Every structure is written in C-alpha cells, then in structure tokens.
Amino acid sequence: MATSSQLSGTSPSVLVPVGSTEQHGPHLPLDTDTRIATAVARGARTRLARDWLVAPAIAYGASGEHQSFAGTISIGTEALTMLLVEYGRSAAGWAERLVFVNGHGGNVAALSAAVARLRSEGRDAGWCPCLAGGGDAHAGHTETSLLLHISPGDVLTDRWRTGNRAPLSELLPSMRRGGVAAVSPVGVLGDPTTATAADGERILAEMVDGCVRRVDRWSPGRDGMLA
C-alpha cells in the first residue's frame, strides 16, 4: 500500500479483498478465504489498465454457519454491511473507483446491500466474487488446491479428511438449521485429498480472469455485483 503523500493529488482505484476468519477443516488455516481473495485481487491488479491499488484485506465476515467450530470469528451480516458502507464512504473521499473482491459466500448479502447503498449515494463502487467452475463448497478440492498453490507450507496434508461430498443444494436445508456441523462434523464440504498445487494455479488463474473481465466491463447490477 502507498503512503498518504504518494496518493495526494492522485485518483487511484482500489481493489479490497474481503474474506473471513472461520474453520476450514482440520487442514487449512482460518484465513483461507482472505488469502484467496487477496491473491485474486493482486493477480487482477497486474492486468488492469488503470491505476489500481490493492488495499489491506477485510479479514472478518459473516460466518455464522461455522460458529460451532473453534477459531471462527463471525461479525454477522448487519455489522459487515455497515463496515463496508463506512469503508466505501471513507475511501471514496480520495479513490476514484472501489471494488470489493469477495472470497466468502457468507458475505454476499452484506456486499449486495452495502454496495447498492454506496452506489445509490453516488459512489462508484462494485464487487466481484472469486469464482471457478465445478468447484466444491468448503475446504475441499478447490480451496485446498488454491492454498497448496498460494501457501503450501500452511496446508496440513497429514490431517486432511474427506467431508460431505453431496451437492450444496441438498445440504442447505440442514445447514440453515444447524450450520456446517449438521452435515459435516469435520467441517469439510468436498474432498481435499485430491487437491494439487497445479489445480490451484489453474483455479486461481480462472478466478483472476473472471475478476479482470468484470472490472474491465464495469456493469454493476442492482446489487452492485459486476457482471
């Protein structure tokens, strides 16, 4: 991040990684989502034509579905929404454009509400998800592969265990009642044991490509998500 004097008199745009602090099974660090969002933002920055900065990540999100697992810190949707609104109002005082890069699905409601509000107030903000096709839901092949590429020394491969591999759509009713623990005592939705760093490199490239396309197109929906 630049110094204040370096930013004075300029109008940069800012990519803000938004993650979470929550359990990711017995083998991945609590800040997995934050690391992924940061890697996507940094990758996108190198390819965007305009003057972009990557801000320090917002590392806490809405993670209530993981609350029964040790290490999870959830601030909830209401608090996250207000945090994002106030963040955007403050950053808009010197930044030309603001993009929140989201690495955690539980943050979507807060991002949608906050960015829609910022835009209604005349601030040029948007958000984009970290998406890759065919991925599993949580701490499985997708996220474990990404971490094997991004932070290989922090993946405890001797502790990884296969979790519930049923489609997320089938698990959601039980998860709404009892969180992730209701469908996976180990906290994993998917199979991390098949993960590879090579897959992680490919998945990260897909996520970066998607983010760059969305930012370059700059077509925010009613919820502020870049199409």
Image (tube, grey):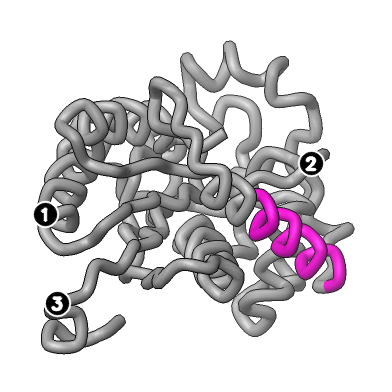
**Label 1: few (<14), some (14–19) or many (≥20) C-alpha neighbours in 10 Å:** few
Q: CA distance from mark 2 to mark 1?
A: 35 Å
Task: Identify which amino acid the numbered label 3 is placed on.
Answer: Gly
Viewer-proximal residue among 151 and 56: 56
Q: Earlier in the sequence, mark 1 or mark 3?
A: 3
Q: Total marks drawn?
A: 3
**Which stretch did the figure color magenta?**
198-210
Viewer-proximal residue among 73 and 85: 85
Find disc 2 in the rendering and name its residue: 133
Find disc 3 in the rendering and name its residue: 9
Task: Identify which amino acid the numbered label 1 is placed on.
Answer: Ser
State the image coordinates of residue 37 (x, y, percent, origin top left): 51, 59
Viewer-proximal residue among 96 and 195: 96
Q: CA distance from mark 1 to mark 3?
A: 16 Å
**Label 3: few (<14), some (14–19) or many (≥20) C-alpha neighbours in 10 Å:** few
Q: Does 161 sit left or right of 124 as displayed?
A: right
Find disc 1 in the rendering and name its residue: 90
Residue 103, numbered label: none
The label nearer to you, 2 versus 1, is 1
Q: Are marks 1 and 3 in contact (CB under 8 Å)?
A: no
State the image coordinates of residue 170 (x, y, percent, origin top left): 72, 16
Q: Is residue 65 visible?
A: no
Residue 199 lies in the magenta-colored region? yes
Q: CA distance from mark 3 to mark 2?
A: 41 Å
Q: Quadrant of residue 144?
A: bottom right
Give the residue drawn at x 81%, y 63%.
Answer: 202
Say which element carries label 2: loop
Vertical comparison of 53 with 88: above or below: below
State the image coordinates of residue 64 (x, y, percent, origin top left): 37, 34
The label nearer to you, 1 versus 3, is 3
